[in-house]
Image (spheres, rainbow, N blue to C red):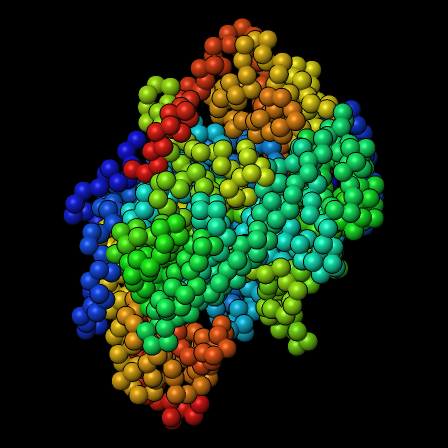
Amino acid sequence: MKLIFEKSKEGRTAFSLPKLDVPEMKIEIEDELLRKEAPNLPQVNELEVVRHYNELERKNHSVDSGFYPLGSCTMKYNPMLNEEMANLFNYIHPYLEEEHVQGALELMYNLQNYLGEITGMDAVTLQPAAGAHGELTGMLIVRKYIEDNGFTNKTKVILPDSAHGTNPASAKMAGFDVVEVKSGADGRVDLEEFKKVMDDTVAAIMLTNPNTLGLFEKDILEIARLAHEHNALLYYDGANLNAIMGKVRPGDMGFDIVHLNLHKTFSTPHGMGGPGSGPVGVKAKLKDYLPKPIVDINEEGKYFFNYDIPKSCGRLRTFYGNFSVMVRAYTYILMMGKEGLKFASEMAVLNANYLRKRLEKEFDIAYDEVCKHEFVIDGSFLKEYGVKTLDFAKRLLDYGIHPPTIYFPLIVHEAMMIEPTETESKEELDNFVEVMHKILEEAKTDPEILKEAPRNTPVRRLNETIANKQLKLRG
Amino acid sequence: MKRFPYIPHTEEDIKEMMNVIGINDIKELYKDIPKLFEGELNIPESKSEIEVKRELLELSKRTINLEDYAMFRGAGIYKHYVPSAVYQLATKRNFLTAYTPYQAEVSQGTLQALYEFQTAICELTGMEVANSSMYDGGTAVAEAILMASRVNKKHKALVAKSIHPEYIEVSRTYTESQGLEIDLINFNEKTGRIDLEDLKSKIDENTSSVVISYPNFFGIIENIKQIKEILPEKVLLIVNAYPIALGLLEAPGKLGADIVVGEGQSLGNYMSFGGPTFGFFASKQKYIRQMPGRIIGETVDADGKRGFVMVLQTREQHIRRAKATSNICSNHALMAVIASIYLSIIGREGLKEIAYQSYQKAHYLAKKLIESEKFEPIFEGEFFNEFVIKPKFDLDKFNEKLYEEKFIGPLNLGYFFEDMKNDALFCATELNTKEEIDYLISKVGEIDEINL
């Protein structure tokens, strides 16, 4: 398909402006700073733009178009109401007098409180733009905490080898050394290994619970005890919160800092890779280190931006966060309510376990026991048919199903990480099981079908080697 | 059993599924968890769509909607016109509800749209390569400083005091923990441009990068070429650009910039209370392996057909973990695609015209304000569509009066700078009409009578 630039034709336009209505003045800018050659943007008609983007849009798989069990990404349904409500707030400038934006501030204030309640945290910032941005915020809060308390020897952050890649990257960006602990034979943090590295030089421990295998870290209370004994903080990566809303709260398990992904757990659309939103909650002892500003309420009941956080870890981005994403998450929380959020988590876990059970006979489930919102298939057994997880995933595309997350977590060979979410029906899950079995049958009888997959997609398998070699990055 | 519109399970479904799993109660799925939360969350009970909509409408009524306001305030977020087609196309559901294009074969829409975005950013900035977006302008500047330091292994950034104050704050937050130092460069009080002498005196062997805005926070157009000429070869010049201005101003890449970043909101994105918007990020090709974020490249499929994939993923956190160029994972792809559609709609001539009209309207406004004799000019340097002037009256009170007339007056710079209390940062775009401007001037004329 042609690029929009390649459809350009001199003299075409999709735009018009009113005639300039002020007296024209001579442009006084020095000549060397005036543009000589206009940027070569497309010159196309409006219908051409519309057809172009419609055609592109049809080439995407999405939650709306079909099953999307991408592990750790919580591809649940994004309600239509969210969009309509977000559109009520499109025309707000960030620098307005607070009395003119009281509704928006109230929404943020309530959302801070709801998220604090769901996670068991005492104070929440909505500033971070995404999950990884929340992790960085959390790690900078850790930094302020250790500086403020004079813990100058604390230089390390411990995380399990099953952690999301963003965890070590965020800890490193905040200036910490990363120590990975091996998972035990049960897929969880190995307490003995953990004790070996846990000492006074540890600033924080980053955990996802349930972890990326979908397993609950059952020793969490002991891990928290050991961490706190050494004045280290326990950090909760909220990517997997969808398993536990209303069932167990990170704050009650001993976690000190939590980040959430509103685009996962709270149903805001993933937008091809963003915008997300990564609020961070902390226990009371850490609230003085939150980024500036947070939304507060004064005695007269007026909402305001509170910049009076003298020990703040600073500012992580401009303005106040991804506001229209917050509106969507807030809408979702109101729709679901306390009982709906709890029910959502229960059904997410039920769906995952149902799939696991239905697949366990013919697929090799890594750590096959009651899981939470997701589980992982070890695809190594496919080798005997001469195919890999990648081939299996590509064949799923032919059946209109987005493959699970593949080759992650790293501790499972040929991993396929499956997270169905609660918004999928039993019929959809049964269809998935059927397709999985069908593809396995194909692998056994005619593996070439898998190796040559996909065939029913807008393009076939793409050559990444060529892409990385030629590095053609613009049209 | 209570039913929910977003959860399909019937009682029978649940029973059948529990049977397959071999449990009698959902509780059994949670029995490995210590310290279960036994109470009820202190948040409201579920509501119907009708009730939720009422609640949100009520909140929105207590929040200004600037669609029909005359807007004379910018300072990083601008009210430009958003053509009707932009959001109608960008928020189509296969764009909106897809994620990062991990499976390229069913993500060609995303990948090609982002590839086109990268192309447009290269065209605008005059740079060789661009990534597919950052969170916003502030984090783009901060990441550019970090990238420069990876390129030349030096640890001091000289940042113009005249870039957006919040960008300076974000840059400090991002760099402090990594042992980088930020030193601010003054602006020339007369011209409003960067103080070249101050810059010269602060450059030393540790200097990694110099950061300027184009135009700067006060609207003044910096001379990138002059600044570049001062810099030693190894020091990288980072230019934070206002993309609309690039319809009129020379591309930073042509004037010697090494990395060009910026806030992309003005390219077809709503103001949305400041977010989500996006940051753009472009550089010279030779630095690409140090670039943060996702990058899309062209390739071919098994049949030799053109296609697009994510490239250079070995820079990224999901492969490189602690050694990645950045921790960024989710970016602001949707906002980037909005910008790409916007640029396709306005096209080459549209961008030129929007920039030209913004310039003309702002200059007409400035001229009239000065002629009113209620303001004194502050800087002599040439500006684009924003400028600072000193009112001879109480600006906040005047803005309150304007607000009653559905006008948003200029930003009081006292908000950011102790020594600029009551200074006004005005802005105009193609959306400001002569009628609005003249009305504003007439209000200025009434100042003595309206008793501020």
Does residue B410 appear in this view?
A: yes
Does residue B163 appear in this view?
A: no
- Left or right? Give the position of B363 relative to A427: left
The extreme front residue here reads B205
- Left or right? Give the position of A3 relative to A420: left
Instruction: Please identify the quarter of the rendering in which residue B220 is found.
Output: bottom left
- Left or right? Give the position of B181 relative to A363: left
Q: Nearer the viewer, residue A360 or B208?
A: B208
The extreme top residue here reads A445
Above or below — where is A304 with respect to B351? below
Residue in the image at 74% along x and 46% along y: A201
Quadrant (top left, top right, bottom left, bottom right) of the C terminus of chain B:
bottom left
Residue in the image at 82% along x and 44% along y: A226
Above or below — where is A382 with respect to A90? above
Residue in the image at 26% along x and 73% along y: B363
Residue in the image at 22% along x and 41% along y: A8
x, y percent for residue B355: 27, 61
x, y percent for residue A432: 58, 23
**Mark count:** 0
x, y percent for residue A90: 45, 59
x, y percent for residue A43: 22, 46
Instruction: Please identify the quarter of the rendering in which residue A75 is found.
Output: top right
Above or below — where is A13 with respect to A194? below
- Left or right? Give the position of B6 relative to B192: right
Quadrant (top left, top right, bottom left, bottom right) of the N terminus of chain B:
top right
